[in-house]
Image (cartoon, grey):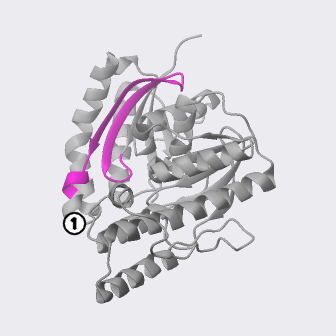
């Protein structure tokens, strides 16, 4: 059978990325141009700036992906691109480029849901995942629990009612003066502190559902920090450690509850927050305690990348589920 080579393009937020993946499994190239250094001075992603940088970077990044893969443009069989969810201006840069590229080469276009891409990152490195499974999708914009009966088959069983976990990391890091992005900054500070010296709530842990809420934890962290500063007892490392512990414990416990209810065989994690080492360790240990395999991508594939987009698009390619050239970009999730 002929190998299927798919070019993936990802521009949903502040990474301009392109990759070539063979047969939905083998990563031939994976090029990422990050804008973190640009946006860190603002304490977060500035959408207009992100869009303009994507315009500057998209051509060179795609060229670099072909060079790394040792391929010519004409060697690919399809062009895949993220078209939802994300920053609308950023999405449109990647989508417009992908449409033009596909049209010029007379190759089919494949539109990919960014979150499905994150989930698929697990299968690029762990092809033998057993189903059914529970997947925790946890990022700067989303926190969701999904029941998966098979690859590409999802049922949403719970999600955040307010802030996403990654958003809470960023906001807490910002008022603690730890910088952006918040996840790595809080993890670094937490390693020097001790959870429990400050007490923060484990929100929604006592509720008999799979919903999340992190706005209360964020507010409690701010209030506790201000109170400690007034008393002259503020230790940023201890507060970071307690905040991280409170957030991670809720994510893990809710996931374990879902795994028990749905009697699954595996647990998956996906999204940028899945790179958090405390989350990875606690989820793996709790999974082992109840005999479940826990999977998460390598750190490079946890953050936004195009290999996950090209890999996931292989499913649509095999089905013949091609996108028309007038396909649009959508900032919202729509559906999984």
- Whether residue 235 is visible: yes
Is residue 269 shown above or below 193? above
Residue 327 magenta: no
> According to the image, label 1 marks what residue?
42
Which residue sits at x=35%, y=45%?
94
Indicate left or right for 97 with 204 as reference.
Answer: left
Q: Where is residue 209 in the image (x, y as percent from the top left)?
A: 72, 68
Which residue sits at x=63%, y=73%?
204
Indicate left or right for 173 with 53 as reference.
Answer: right
Q: Which quadrant: the N terminus?
A: top right
- Which sits in the foreground, 141 or 218? 218
- Whether residue 326 is visible: no
Helix, strand or loop status at disc 1: helix
Which residue sits at x=81%, y=48%?
263
Residue 16 magenta: yes
Q: In which quarter of the image is residue 107?
A: top left
- Which sits in the foreground, 278 or 312? 278
Magenta stretch in the rendered image:
11-38
Is residue 105 shown above or below 117? above
Indicate left or right for 254 with 122 as reference.
Answer: right
Indicate left or right for 50 with 82 as reference.
Answer: left
Q: Where is residue 290 in the image (x, y as percent from the top left)?
A: 74, 46
Is residue 216 shown above or below 138? below
């Amino acid at each position: 059978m002929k190998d299927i080579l798919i070019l993936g393009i990802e521009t949903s937020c502040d990474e301009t990325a392109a990759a070539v993946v063979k047969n939905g499994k083998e990563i031939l190239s994976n090029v990422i141009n990050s804008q973190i250094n640009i946006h860190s001075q603002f304490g977060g992603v500035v959408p207009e700036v992100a869009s303009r940088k994507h315009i500057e970077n998209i051509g060179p990044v795609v060229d670099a992906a072909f060079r790394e893969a040792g391929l010519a443009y004409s060697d690919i069989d399809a062009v895949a691109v993220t078209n939802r969810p994300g920053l609308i201006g950023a999405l449109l840069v990647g989508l417009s480029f992908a449409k033009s590229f596909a049209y010029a080469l007379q190759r089919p276009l494949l539109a990919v849901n960014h979150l499905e891409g994150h989930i698929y990152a697990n299968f690029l490195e762990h092809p033998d995942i057993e189903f059914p499974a529970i997947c925790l999708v946890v990022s700067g914009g989303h926190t969701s629990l999904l029941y998966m009966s098979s690859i590409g088959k999802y049922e949403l069983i719970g999600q955040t009612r307010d802030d996403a976990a990654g958003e809470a990391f960023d906001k807490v890091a910002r008022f603690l003066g730890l910088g952006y992005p918040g996840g790595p900054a809080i993890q670094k500070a937490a390693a020097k502190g001790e959870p429990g010296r400050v007490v923060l709530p484990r929100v929604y842990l006592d509720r008999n559902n799979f919903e999340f809420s992190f706005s209360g934890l964020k507010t409690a962290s701010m209030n506790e920090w201000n109170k400690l500063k007034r008393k002259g007892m503020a230790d940023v490392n201890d507060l970071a450690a307690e905040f991280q512990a409170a957030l991670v414990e809720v994510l893990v416990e809710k996931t374990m509850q879902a795994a028990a209810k749905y009697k699954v065989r595996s647990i998956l994690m996906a999204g940028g927050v899945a790179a958090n080492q405390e989350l990875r360790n606690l989820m793996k240990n709790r999974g082992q305690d109840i005999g479940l395999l826990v999977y998460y991508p390598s750190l490079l594939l946890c953050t936004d990348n195009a290999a996950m987009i090209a890999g996931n698009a292989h499913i649509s390619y095999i089905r013949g589920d091609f996108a028309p050239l007038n396909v649009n970009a959508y900032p919202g999730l729509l559906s999984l």
